[in-house]
């Protein structure tokens, strides 16, 4: 190992320790900023803040691995793998299941209060106190609109636009029709909707379980591949010596990029499909 390489490794080690210390240091939480949309730039900034410590560990590990194997590009590949692979191989959140769960709680609560003689709008106002977290803000805004003399169908349609869910559209459309009819048959309708939500929720969970199976297999294959590749690069340096050349490193990065692309395709295939809504804004 030359003196220049030793000095470079010393500087990298010190820099890595500084980054690790910065990641471990507690900072006061910053107030959340309200944005008009969920842009990719805001998502990347939030992701970078949450992955600071992992990135610091990856940088230190990447520099050390590059020094041991002689493949300089690993100083970049390892940090990206440490941060990116857990994201690519994790289960994506299923908003349909989350929405169905909160709608089931809300609808059953409404169905329990309607037989007491309350109207649809009164029951909705009363449900705000025990609303699930996902529905708390939209319901509060719905009540505010009703207080501002919006008609029940208009306020419910606006809430449907905010939730942006086909399952919520079915519930809110039924409530709008019941409100226009003065609540006639609303209790039976809500009980039927609650049973329908349960059936759909059961089906969605089964589908989500099936979608998770290929992710588990790919996760296992990826872990085995990474471990074998790391061991081979360390203990089989003579065999992998061509990857230490500039052209070899370009080929190595290209192969790794193709593998990452296949992971992206797999993740996209396992995402729930977007369904069309039945309620549309009139504005």
Image (spheres, grey):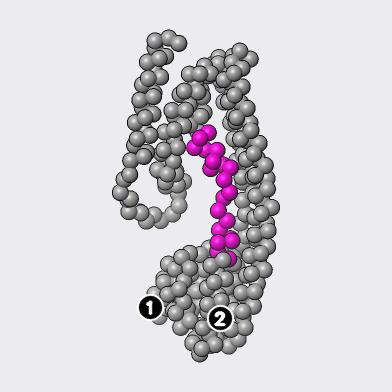
Q: In this orientation, which residue lies closer to the viewer: 264 or 77?
A: 77
Give coordinates of residue 199: x percent, y percent: 67, 68
Residue, disc 1: 148
Asked where in the image residue 143 lies, by quadrant, the reply is bottom left
Q: Is residue 1 above or below residue 227?
A: above
By secondary structure, the bulk of the magenta-drawn segment is best described as helix
Instruction: Write the start and end of the magenta stretch as one range.
Output: 81-100
- Are the residues at dot 1 and dot 2 in contact (C-beta closer than 8 Å)? no
Pick out the residue farthest to the left. Answer: 28
Q: In this orientation, which residue lies closer to the viewer: 143 or 2?
A: 2
Q: Is residue 279 magenta?
A: no
Pick out the residue farthest to the bottom. Answer: 117
**Residue sitting at 44 percent across and 41 percent down?**
51
**Residue sitting at 53 percent across and 33 percent down?**
81
How crowded pointer 2 is (Cα within 10 Å; few <14, some 14-19, many 20+) is rated as many
In this rendering, does residue 180 appear at all?
A: no
Measured in 3D between alpha carbons, the distance from the residue under mark 1 to the one under mark 2, in whole angstroms, is 25 Å
Q: Secondary structure at mark 2?
A: helix
Q: Secondary structure at mark 1?
A: loop
Residue, disc 2: 111
Give coordinates of residue 262: x percent, y percent: 64, 37
Q: Is residue 82 magenta?
A: yes
């Amino acid at each position: 190992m030359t003196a220049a390489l030793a000095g470079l490794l010393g500087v990298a080690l010190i820099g890595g320790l500084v980054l690790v210390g910065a990641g471990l240091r507690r900072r006061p939480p910053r107030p959340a900023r309200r944005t008009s949309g969920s842009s990719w730039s805001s998502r990347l900034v939030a992701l970078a803040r949450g992955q600071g410590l992992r990135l610091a560990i990856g940088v230190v590990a990447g520099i050390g691995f590059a020094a041991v194997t002689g493949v300089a590009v690993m100083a970049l590949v390892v940090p990206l793998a440490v941060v990116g692979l857990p994201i690519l191989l994790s289960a994506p959140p299923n908003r349909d299941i989350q929405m169905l769960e909160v709608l089931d709680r809300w609808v059953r609560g409404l169905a329990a209060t309607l037989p007491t003689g309350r109207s649809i709008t009164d029951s909705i106002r009363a449900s705000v106190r025990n609303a699930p977290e996902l529905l708390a803000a939209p319901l509060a805004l719905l009540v505010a609109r009703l207080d501002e003399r919006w008609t029940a169908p208009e306020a419910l349609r606006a809430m449907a636009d905010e939730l942006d869910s086909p399952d919520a559209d079915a519930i809110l459309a039924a409530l709008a029709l019941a409100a226009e009819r003065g609540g006639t048959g609303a209790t039976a309708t809500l009980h039927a909707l609650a049973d329908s939500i349960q059936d759909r929720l059961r089906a969605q969970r089964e589908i989500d379980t099936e979608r998770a199976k290929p992710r588990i297999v790919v996760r296992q294959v990826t872990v085995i591949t990474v471990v074998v590749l790391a061991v081979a690069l360390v203990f089989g340096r003579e065999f992998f010596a061509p990857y230490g050349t500039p052209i070899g490193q370009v080929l190595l990065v290209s192969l790794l990029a193709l593998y990452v692309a296949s992971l992206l395709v797999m993740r996209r295939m396992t995402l729930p499909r977007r369904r069309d809504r039945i309620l549309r804004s009139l504005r």
